[in-house]
Image (spheres, rainbow, N blue to C red):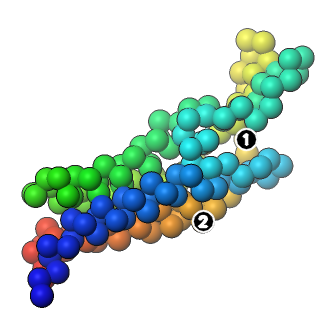
Amino acid sequence: MNFKRFFPFLGLLFSVIVLVMVFLPTLNASGYDSYSGLQIIMGYTISDIPIIGVTKLPFSVLGLLAFLFPIAAGIISVVMPKGYLISVILFAVGAVLLFILPQYINIVHIIGNSVTTIDVEWTLLSAPIIAGIVSALGMVVGLLEFLNIK
């Protein structure tokens, strides 16, 4: 049985798993709640007190790319017959961005015209770890497809 024909669909399965992980708790901050991948990507208002100000997670382009690259890689592996190299690169970049997610996410506090970035010690929860591992597996599957191993 030739397993090579199932490789693109494995990539698609991995991208669906990453898509599901967007909705699960992704980061936890000391002194704050846990935030889902969608809240980290799109931004989230933590508190809005008129006199004190607004505390929020801003929109994160790198967070968006961290979850979007593996999803796009899975779609490319199915749609493009020779797109496995692009798929491998997108899976790899997505996995790296998912594992270093706490490094580029910050909380901002806005009082009037003053914007202050709060240094928070983030804890990576299980969803981005699972998504990163699945992205790495997608990269391995793409490499096997690229090397023409049956």
Residue 47 left/right relative to 82: right
Rendering coords of residue 51 (x, y %): 90, 17
Rendering coords of residue 136 (x, y %): 37, 67
Residue sticking out furthest to the top: 113
Rendering coords of residue 134 (x, y %): 41, 67
* Amino acid type indicated by mark 2: Ser
* Amino acid type indicated by mark 1: Asp
Q: Looking at the image, which residue is at 14% across and 68% down?
A: 146
Say which mark, if any, is on residue 70. none
- The answer to whether any part of residue 116 appears in the image is yes
Residue 102 left/right relative to 29: left
Residue 118 vs 142, above or below: the answer is: above
Secondary element at image label 2: helix
Secondary element at image label 1: loop
Are the residues flagged by discs 2 and 1 in contact, CB closer than 8 Å? no
Task: Answer few, some or many: residues within 10 Å of disc 1's Cα (few below 14, many 20 plus, some between 14 and 19).
Answer: few
**Callout in the foreground (2, 1):** 2
The mark that comes first in sequence, 2 or 1, is 1
Rendering coords of residue 42 (x, y %): 56, 35
Q: Which residue is mark 2?
A: 126
Q: Which residue is mark 1?
A: 119
